[in-house]
Amino acid sequence: MDEPTILLTNDDGIESAGLRAVYDGLDAVGDVTVVAPADDQSAVGRAISHEVSVREHELGYVVEGTPTDCVVAGLEALVPETDLVVAGCNRGANLGAYVLGRSGTVSAAVEATFFEVPAIAVSMYIPVRDDTAFADIEADGDSYAEAVRATSYLADHAFEAGVFEQCDYLNVNAPVAEWGPAELEVTQPSRVYEMGAVRDGDAVTLHDRIWERMAEGDIPDPEGSDRRAVVDGKVSVSPLTAPHTTEHHESLDALAETYDPAAGP
């Protein structure tokens, strides 16, 4: 492939340091156009709007909407010649199978696959001990260097290597650059799930306990998992498919055969 046309989006908003860092890195790989939300759209999943307003920006376009809105608008109306969608770099990791559907960053990559456009979602892990403190963590452009290096490398070489002939999108998670040079490891999303909830009167606080364990380096995730790789200071790359896979189930067939539509509830 000649120089690819790249649509760059994110969920942190068009003014985020992570998006700008990835833009600068990808600029040496292909023709990059940003189509990104006007403001923070973290954890919106694949939420989509009926109509969004769009305005021009020095990097491309600003969309008053979600990351999914950006991808649909970008591929259908703004940058229809796109060869590759890149989403990120997100300020904070998107690790574990249970996180994939929540993440606006990963959801943007998933949306691209329905257009049969390959995609890369990229996020940077920032060690924190509590979800509520995360909003106060700042990261400048230099902190994203390992994420940018890995993303640019994959965008430059994945097509020729045939990577997207075997997967639909890549979920990339990198440690902060301050940890030093990071190797790249092919991984699978961790299945470890540690969400909890505590009731206090009329309120219930939801909490992901894995963040504290990650900050301590004490995680239950096995070798080969995305979370283990990042905590060990590596760049995790998970090759994934979309939409969700389905399998034939004989037990469900049996239920379908005995179903009586005339019977009462």
Image: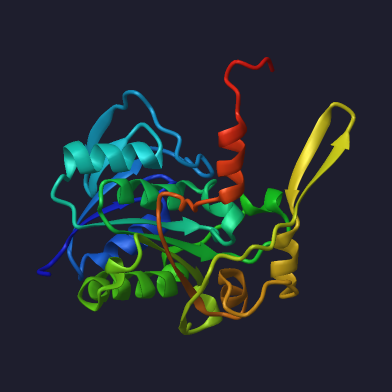
As drawn, 44 above or below 247: above
* Residue 25, visible in the rendered structure: no
As drawn, 1 above or below 120: below
As drawn, 196 above or below 20: above
As drawn, 101 above or below 202: below
Name the residue: 72% across, 61% down.
Answer: 210
19 and 163: which is toward the camera: 163
Q: Is residue 181 left or right of residue 20?
A: right
Q: Residue furthest left?
A: 2
Q: Is residue 108 left or right of residue 35?
A: right
Q: Residue furthest right?
A: 201
**Whole-percent x, y for residue 131 in the image:** 69, 52
Name the residue: 59% across, 15% down.
Answer: 262
179 and 118: which is toward the camera: 118
**Whole-percent x, y for residue 70 in the image:** 32, 40
Classify residue 146 by image quadrant.
Answer: bottom left
Name the residue: 78% across, 40% down.
Answer: 205
Q: Is residue 92 left or right of residue 25?
A: right
Quadrant for the C terminus, please.
top right
41 and 101: which is toward the camera: 101
**Whole-percent x, y for residue 145 in the image:** 41, 73
Q: Is residue 53 left or right of residue 220?
A: left
Name the residue: 57% across, 78% down.
Answer: 224
* Residue 8, visible in the rendered structure: yes
Quadrant for the N terminus, please.
bottom left
**Whole-percent x, y for residue 260 in the image:** 60, 23
Q: Residue furthest front?
A: 258
